[in-house]
Image (cartoon, grey):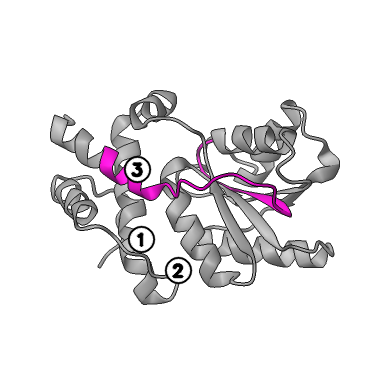
Amino acid sequence: MISAQNWADAERLWDFLQMGHELRPCSVGIGLGSHDLGVADVSADLYQRGLFPLVVFTGATSRTTAGRMPRGEAEHYRDRALELGVPGSVIFVEPNARNTGENIRLSRALLAEQGVDVGSVLLISKPYEERRAYATARKLWPNVDVVSASASMALREYVDSIQDARFVLDMIVGAQQRVLLYPGQGFMIDQDVPTDVVAAYERLRDGGFTSRLMPE
């Protein structure tokens, strides 16, 4: 059972893990692969609003997506974007990345191979992955401006869209753990984390929302 305190703590993490960036036109959009096809929906909307001329969908499969996206996350994102009217000529597929660092590195390499001049990147992710994606890109691609974007919705609305509250809260706790740990491992830039965010994370972790945690 998920308690009122669990929800309050998850909502605090939900708010913190989003960057709150003002959207602006960028050289390219990068849709980060995951279980959530909503990332492709947001990418298509932002393309149609003129925020980037090209989009890279990046992602292989994971334990979460192998069953529902057997051809790979990037391929399924591409299919969804095509359904929504994005021309195939503006879509690049990066099919090998298995984590956020690889999403960034392999997308960067693909764009370089294609001769795309990149001065800014609009990173599209799940809402609770914005901060992790931003910090990773700033570490691995420091010479580009990074803007973060995701579906604009409240936590409860997002949970309703996924239809698995426990899964979403576990994922949020896992995302927060990585924001705390990865700077020290050289995977992303360091960011200030408010004490109330750390406390909310620790309560959720100690309350058993641990399926997405890494060993510490």
Does residue 171 show up?
Answer: no
Label 2 belongs to which residue? 188
The span picked out in magenta is: 11-36
In this rendering, the answer to whether 110 lies above or below 41 is: below
User: Residue 43 is drawn in which quadrant?
Assistant: top right
Residue under the point 33% across and 37% down: 167
What's the residue type where badge 3 is placed? Asp
Residue under the point 81% across and 44% down: 90
Residue 126 image point, x, y percent: 48, 42
Does residue 17 show up?
Answer: yes
- Asked if labels 1 and 3 touch by Cβ distance under 8 angstroms, the answer is no
- Asked if labels 2 and 1 touch by Cβ distance under 8 angstroms, the answer is yes
Residue under the point 64% across and 66% down: 144
Of the numbered discs 1 and 2, the one sitting upstream in the chain is 1
Label 1 belongs to which residue? 178
In this rendering, the answer to whether 209 lies above or below 144 is: above
Count the marks. 3
The answer for how far apart the CA atoms under marks 3 and 2 are is: 20 Å
Of the numbered discs 3 and 1, the one sitting upstream in the chain is 3
**Which label lies toward us, 1 or 2?**
2
Label 3 belongs to which residue? 15
Mark 3 Cα shell of 10 Å, populated few (<14), some (14-19), many (≥20): some
The answer for how far apart the CA atoms under marks 3 and 1 are is: 16 Å
Camera-nearest residue between 73 and 92: 92
**Which label lies toward us, 3 or 1?**
3
